[in-house]
Image (cartoon, coloured by chain):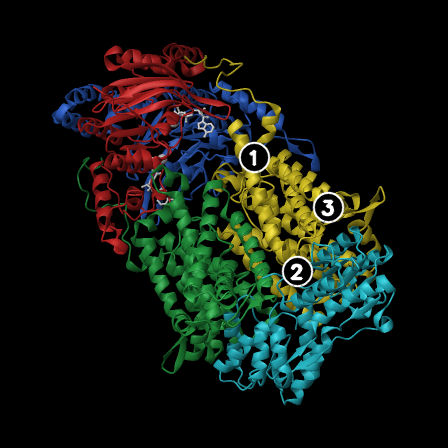
Chain colours: A red, B blue, C green, D yellow, E cyan
Amino acid sequence: MEPLLEIRNVAKSFGNVVSLHDISTTVHAGQVTCVLGDNGAGKSTLIKILSGVHQPDHGQLLIDGNPVTLGTPRAALDAGIATVYQDLAMVPLMAIWRNFFLGSEPTKGWGPFRRFDRKLAKEVTRQELLDMGIDIRDPDQPVGTLSGGERQSVAIARAVHFGARLLILDEPTSALGVKQAGVVLRYIVQARDRGLGVIFITHNPHHAYPVGDRFLLLNRGRSLGDFAKSEIPLAELTRLMAGGAELEQLAHELERGGGAEKVGREMREESQTFN
Amino acid sequence: MEPLLEIRNVAKSFGNVVSLHDISTTVHAGQVTCVLGDNGAGKSTLIKILSGVHQPDHGQLLIDGNPVTLGTPRAALDAGIATVYQDLAMVPLMAIWRNFFLGSEPTKGWGPFRRFDRKLAKEVTRQELLDMGIDIRDPDQPVGTLSGGERQSVAIARAVHFGARLLILDEPTSALGVKQAGVVLRYIVQARDRGLGVIFITHNPHHAYPVGDRFLLLNRGRSLGDFAKSEIPLAELTRLMAGGAELEQLAHELERGGGAEKVGREMREESQTFN
Amino acid sequence: MAGTVTGVVKTDERVVRVGLLRRLLVKPELGSLVGALVVFLFFASLSDVFRSPRGIANWLDPASTLGIMAVAIALLMIGGHFDLSAGVQTGTAAITTGLLTTYYGLNTWVALLTSLALVLTVGFLNGYLVVRTGLPSFIITLGTFLMLQGLNLGVTKIVTDTVQVNNFDQVAGYSVLHAVMASTITIGGTGFQIAILWWIVVTIGGSYLLLRTRFGNWIFAVGGDETASTNVGVPVMRTTVTLFMITSAAAWFIGNTQIVRLTSIQAQAGFGQELIYIVAAVIGGCLLTGGFGSAVGASLGALIFGMTSQGIVYAGWDADWFKFFLGAMLLLAVLANQFVRRFAESRR
Amino acid sequence: MAGTVTGVVKTDERVVRVGLLRRLLVKPELGSLVGALVVFLFFASLSDVFRSPRGIANWLDPASTLGIMAVAIALLMIGGHFDLSAGVQTGTAAITTGLLTTYYGLNTWVALLTSLALVLTVGFLNGYLVVRTGLPSFIITLGTFLMLQGLNLGVTKIVTDTVQVNNFDQVAGYSVLHAVMASTITIGGTGFQIAILWWIVVTIGGSYLLLRTRFGNWIFAVGGDETASTNVGVPVMRTTVTLFMITSAAAWFIGNTQIVRLTSIQAQAGFGQELIYIVAAVIGGCLLTGGFGSAVGASLGALIFGMTSQGIVYAGWDADWFKFFLGAMLLLAVLANQFVRRFAESRR
Amino acid sequence: VNKPDNNTQGGGAGKYGYKIAVVTHGASGDAFWSIVKAGAEKAGSDLGLNLTYASDGDPQKQAQLIDAAVNQKVDGLVVSMANPGALKASVQKAVAAGIPVITINSGGSDSKAFGALSHVGQDESVAGNAVGTTLKAAGVKNAICVIHEAGNVGLEQRCAAAKTALGGTMTNLQVDNNNLPAAQATIKAKLQTDPSIDGVVTLGGQVAVVASNAIGEAASTAKLATFDLNADVAKAVQSGKILFAVDQQPYLQGYLGVQMLALYKSNLNVLGGGQTVLTGPTLVTKDNAAQIEKLAAAGTR
Ligand SMILES: Nc1ncnc2c1ncn2[C@@H]1O[C@H](COP(=O)(O)OP(=O)(O)OP(=O)(O)O)[C@@H](O)[C@H]1O
Ligand SMILES: Nc1ncnc2c1ncn2[C@@H]1O[C@H](COP(=O)(O)OP(=O)(O)OP(=O)(O)O)[C@@H](O)[C@H]1O
Ligand SMILES: [Mg+2]
Ligand SMILES: [Mg+2]
């Protein structure tokens, strides 16, 4: 089957910082590709290239096998790619419902009387957030006064609502409580089942493994490998992500230091399931 | 033993939003108090009260048994309380080393010739970050160009460096990779072993349980309970945090829906260790 | 434990009930409404002419011209930008119309369209440069401000040998123009400038645009966070350029109103007014940093300014101290405004 | 896999080597340095007097006065604020000194101290109000700007019955003042104003303050992110107020230099200069939004402005178009500046 | 639209060819000073001179402009001295450099002392005196003086002199020259509050026109007099809306200043033997307004 999105040998530098070097992977419709890697590995840079925020220095993007240039976020959106940015892309002073529909406002009326359909917008916002388990008190509340996790939920609800073909989520669960994180995972699965391609960035192998079909591992801007789920068991994924040996050593060190033995032991015990 | 910090019946509202209602807990020197709770539960509000950013509407803070008013962040810092804010409190345009020492700049020279000891500052910054496993390329790089996790690491390194008696960390591990998260946990343990009190906010019971001595659970601004480690096993803590029943139900739902059975099953299997 | 995942929680114990009054208090225009009332009562108590119909007609007149510009500038400021060239553009528009008709004998309507095209081009360039270079609009429009000032003077002097354009009442169609732009409407024996009517229309139109259209949503977004707006697909360039062009169109209207009313225009007309437009918008609750404000507020700001500047004369205060009173009024107005807003927010 | 947790990684493969030239390119002042060179070469090619020693002495003179203020304003702008009252404060300082000595016969030094205390109070109030109310400094200082303008005029008229203060050369100690503030230093047969020396001192002092002291660190922090600064314990109020007072002190120096040089001062002295100070700082690479800029850059901006304003005269261009040229120069300068910066950053 | 560009070019073929600089304190765009400039430029082209005109209202900057002219080694310098003390050093530097200086418009009393050859025109107070006297004769007792640029020395001098000559009450009113409709409303407000005002003095042609509108709208009977001319003022004088306008003949100040330098340079002539050469004031009334209107429209009166 033709992949929905193919990334071929993409590279990107900022001035003298090489953020990405020769990265390739594919995303199929109805599948989830997880991008994993340490801090600063270049994950956000990669998805910003896919969502039209940055242009790659080298390499190609192909949608349905055709090379495309995503020059602006609008172009990406029009190509059916919706993104939840790590830094969220919300306007703090604006009401929740205005943020939700920002850039894709529903209108009613005709010609010069075409206007923002506020009622619809408020209703949809409320409903989509309720579906995520977020009961906003007042859709007119400025986004800037929401808690970090609430804001995250609004951004995800928005992307899910507008994501037509490809949904990209950059660490959507990191600021979330357990309950909300579960809801997000369910959304990813739902989107996948609706036939969307999903790119999911996370540090948590326990979040990634159940939902992912492919795993792209980045380290310091380079690819450590691009695996199908069948090629890599959870334990190996965890080990690759966690830098297994290092973690072992860390636990070991803790054990030697003063009163930290117990923690060290606990951590070592956990090191298999450690997030 | 006299607790280092005692929080008595603290409450805080923003306009018509009640963020915190009647919260009490204690932090002892050489112990770690974890604050756990859903998104919007009021965790950040609580620590902002402790670090002098917000003033409580009701209730009292006691340090070493003496009631104190922390009117400004400076007052809190002077009382030996250092905080890693969830929104980090960094100035994006400024160099890393300038941010690191911001507000507590080392000086040399005398009188009108007293000046910022830049060499010392750069050296300490580099060393402290190296100790965290972050090898910054150029301490003169503006903080705004660091990745989310790198920025988080800088903030933590700073608080650890300046935290004299009480160290507060608001979701310090959420943006971090596995390796860095491990390092942060080790820092918490080290600080505790040095006799500092630590308040640690997280969504991850696997991060909280190994290092915590007390657990304060918040839900929608109210306390669900304030437990010593001996009073609550990890499983119970996970259940309380995860809203156990709900997660069960979620996994159940996923199982019924279209192609999501497998995930549902995996998630249910994980639900004990689920983060 | 929290409610179920998908359950609809009808009431939320964390939300304190909010009365209508308190909800009103958080509107950006409330502070300026209170300010306007205070200023009115203050001068009305000092001078009975001030509160008489002809007094009111008198201070509504400068307020209306200022108000139309202030609404346009408010939209621009909500969109995150300044336009220091707005004042001088009124002069550019009027001088162009005047020279083309009285010196080059061009048809009046063609001349009006030409001057409109000219200032719209200036607005376009302002917006385009601001977005493309990423430089602050303050500095870009300061550049066009200086350039237009030089152009207005240089061209007027070359063509007319003087520093003003005269005899506009002799152009064809003047009576129509006068009726539309500069006639007075008599209500209860007092003549009110028709510009007051246009002011009301512009205020309503500006509010509608801001609050009820998608373009309005983009204005708030672009001013509130440009990066976020770009990332969600708001056409930042188009929005910003349009805002600058709206300002230019308003300047065109005001400039031409002036030449119609006075039948002449001077080379330095409008110079220095740009700060006053901004002051009116800010008194009306616009944030200088963008993303917050209202058209009604800007109009109220213009009203406060109009009442103050004329009220000082009605009160018979020494002219040398005019600026002092004006400054004190401005400070009082914004401080009161801020106080009301803070109070309202704490009560929210 | 990444290196070990605590291991020192000597080289980082992600960092491309950076040459000295490229490192220079990211300095905020580089763009303005290039701009200054271009402007110099341009006018030097048009007029040989411009590049002669006496020509240089001539355009360094306005540049020096402007430069001293521009450095102070640059510090303030890096701290995230404007001061629209800075220009008028120069007048206030000079008028106070002048009136106290020539009309009230106060000792010259006491009068100087009194006027210093007065403008410092103004600066304190500016800063205090800005921090306490959270209102933009633009609007607060616009208020004090208007008030001081009224005060300068009103007080001068009451005391002198005219709009200027004269005969300052007859006060005691005038010769000392003249030597310190307004004498010329002859180098190679050409007299250079001593203000140029002060300008250099102020530029070096400003740079030192910004880059080498903890107060300088606070300036960048407060302008870059006020909330973050508060949260890490930077005394935001003290820093901001001090910055406004530094601006006032500079205004005091410049105002008194002027009355010493001219032996008289007009009630409207300094009015309108505030924009030029800001322009110089911005040409010099200061961000209008705060948190970025340099003292050297501001001085270079002042130099560009001084060269342009005098260069137009040396080039013999028509004075009617002066503003036009000035605006075009400003736009070219900032565009070139921006271009260089972008280029530098892309090469970084 | 072809005006000879005599600013940058050398003069008419084979004529004097001297380099003359005119440096005044008039703001660019000011009607009065644009006529001075027109006069100076006409003299420049008539006599074939290389003429530059520069101006700045800030005395320090004006001094710097004079310094620049001296640096360029001009053959002669025309200076207006609203602020003689401030220009003293620069003017004396010019004289010391052997450059002949003529002062115009203001600063007549210091002209000699600074070493200038002669002075053309007179202080604003002479014109002000004429306005006050004429209004007094017309029976005005309670007048307002409309200042359109706050703190301008010349305008203040005009009002002060007019007030002294009038004898009755005269209060100053400030308006914004760059927003004339608002200026009109302000004048109207003043007339509405104090119906006893029977005279209005404006200090520039542009404000005079809006003042006459304001008088009409406020249904006031105040008599209007103005300094300076333009075509609209001349028209209004003819129709009786403006009682009279006082004209200092700024064109002459510019023209004569330059002409005298040329004569001095070529023939060492000094007009009036160094005595102040008066250029006015002349009154424009109903009788002579019709002829002057055209000249005013051409920017020479
Ligand atoms: N605009 C930029 N200018 C300069 N450097 C940048 C820029 N954006 C990213 N970088 C650098 O590129 C590298 C990769 O950053 P990126 O944000 O993609 O990492 P990440 O994998 O998303 O990390 P995290 O898990 O912490 O979010 C980092 O070292 C960062 O400093
Ligand atoms: N300055 C403020 N103004 C108004 N409401 C606020 C403000 N700060 C916080 N809130 C509200 O208070 C509640 C608690 O917020 P808080 O940030 O403390 O939650 P949290 O527990 O830290 O959540 P998270 O895990 O998502 O970070 C939220 O509903 C939020 O909307
Ligand atoms: Mg990232
Ligand atoms: Mg939080």
- Kindly report which numbered mark, 2 or 1, lies closer to the viewer in this rendering: 2
Q: CA distance from mark 2 to mark 1?
A: 41 Å
- Kindly report which numbered mark, 2 or 3, lies closer to the viewer in this rendering: 2
Q: Are marks 1 and 3 on the same chain?
A: yes
Dot 1 amino acid type: Val
The answer to whether the beta carbon of the residue marked 1 is less than 8 Å from any atom of ligand 1 is no
The disc label shown at residue E4, or none = 2
Residue occupying image coordinates x 51% and y 29%: D346
- Kindly report which numbered mark, 1 or 3, lies closer to the viewer in this rendering: 3
Horizontal relation, residue D9 to residue D38: left or right: left
Question: For numbered disc 1, what is the local secondary structure?
Answer: helix
Could you classify mark 3 by the number of other residues whose Cα lies within 10 Å: few (under 14), some (14-19), or many (20 or more)? some
Residue occupying image coordinates x 39% and y 43%: C236
Residue B92 image point, x, y percent: 49, 34
Residue that numbered label 1 is attached to:
D340
Q: CA distance from mark 1 to mark 3?
A: 27 Å
Mark sitting earlier along the chain (1/3): 3
Question: For numbered disc 3, what is the local secondary structure?
Answer: loop
Residue occupying image coordinates x 57% and y 73%: E207
Answer above or below: position of C131 versus C43. Answer: above
Question: For numbered disc 2, what is the local secondary structure?
Answer: loop
**Chain holding disc 2:** E
Could you classify mark 2 by the number of other residues whose Cα lies within 10 Å: few (under 14), some (14-19), or many (20 or more)? few
Horizontal relation, residue D244 to residue C292: left or right: right
For the residue pair B43 and C141, the one nearer the viewer reads as: C141
Residue that numbered label 3 is attached to:
D47
